[in-house]
Amino acid sequence: MKKFFPVYVRVPLLFAIFFFAIEWIVRGDSDKPAFIEHPVVLILLGLFLFALIAVEMVASATSKIMDRLMTPEERAQKEKEASLPFAETPWVKRLMQKLTSTKTIAQEGDIMMDHDYDGIKELDNELPPWWVGLFYVTVIFAVIYLLRFHVFDGDSQVAEFEKEMIAAKEQVEEYKKTAPDMLTADQAVFSDDPAVLSAGKALFDTNCAVCHKPDGGGAIGPNLTDDHWILGGGMKNVFNTISEGGRPGKGMVPWKTNFKPSEIEKIASYVISLNGTVPAEAKAAEGDIIWSKSELSADKATEETPATEEAPATTDAEVAPEAAN
Ligand code: HEC
């Protein structure tokens, strides 16, 4: 052993193992190393190093004394062992013998069986203990497995999968809460929640009222309260107009660089809430697209009906080729 781990490898290695073990146990979630956070650890490390060196010194002194007490034959034997290659050192050999319990050729007579097939004989070797040990381990594993999953109702793979999916979905929801800005025009929904509308109004008053008037009656920009829309009414279109801007050169710029999508959604809700109100000096209606707030609920209805109508259509389409076959 000593030959393969000389003292200048052994001491640093043991110290490193101890150091990382302590770090692992003591540190926890802190981002500072444990020996800085807790000075006690530093003392402990110092003591360990001291003990390590002390043990090494005692060991080397003992082995020197032992050397002196040896007879010349014993010394010769020791030197011979020290020069052996790794696989032939006595402790490796003993270990291999323990693991395999092989018999030497000289001992084969003891385990010879009386089977004799045209001069071919059979030995009754013991099963190698490493293999037998492994076999026992699998037996114990099987018992634990059986009890856990077939007697005590452990989760099956399907249940595990479903649990993980639920956990992942929760994480996604959690993520979306703090990052609502993956929102697109298609997902934007109108909200008449006063908190949403007042947030939308605040943004509208500071950014949009210059051109659309605070009451939406229209100035440079068109009247936002009537049912006529140049670029289209409804949540999706209004969201799009605010985000992408109007027709080039008209003055309505894309606002997506100024606002997060979640903010645009609020402004759009506010704009839609203005529909049907009567502003003081309303600009004449512009645009050929007719849309009013009352269509909001109708929107939802039309969203739902095609889904139910499409369902049988697709199954027909799927069945048809099969019928042809
Ligand atoms: C510089 C003046 C100006 C500002 C500021 C402005 N708009 Fe406009 N807006 C316009 C003009 C001009 C149009 C017409 C665009 C066109 O004809 O394509 C318009 C069109 C619109 C439309 C489409 C109306 C329709 O009939 O389809 C909406 C909705 C709208 N603006 C909302 C907003 C919102 C919300 C803001 C604030 C974030 C804003 N605007 C800021 C000038 C402005």
Image: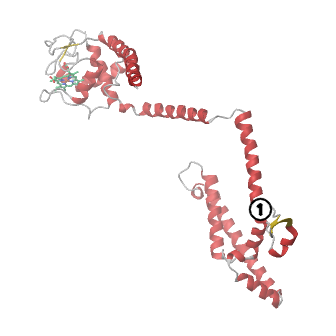
Residue at left 17%, top 23%? 211
**Residue topped by disc 1:** 128
Quarter residue 71 falls in: bottom right
Front in this rendered view, residue 27 or 1: 1
Residue found at x 23% / y 25%: 241
**Residue 219 in the image: above or below residue 136:** above
Dot 1 alpha-carbon crowd within 10 angstroms: few under 14, some 14 to 19, many 20 or more = some
Residue for point 69% across, 70% down: 50
In-front residue for pair 149/20: 149
Residue 78 location, x and y as percent?
77, 84
Residue 234, horizontal then vertical, whole percent: 28, 17
On screen, 141 above or below 50? above
Q: In the picture, which quadrant includes the C terminus?
A: top left
Q: Quadrant of the N terminus?
A: bottom right
Q: How many marks?
A: 1
Q: Determine whether the residue tagged by mark 1 lies in a helix, strand or loop.
A: loop
317 sits to left or right of 207: right
- What amino acid is found at the position of numbered circle 1 in the picture? Pro
In the displayed orientation, state which residue is furthest to the front: 118
Q: Residue furthest bottom?
A: 72
Q: Nearer the viewer, residue 139 or 240?
A: 139
In the image, residue 320 sits, relative to residue 30, either above or below, namely: above
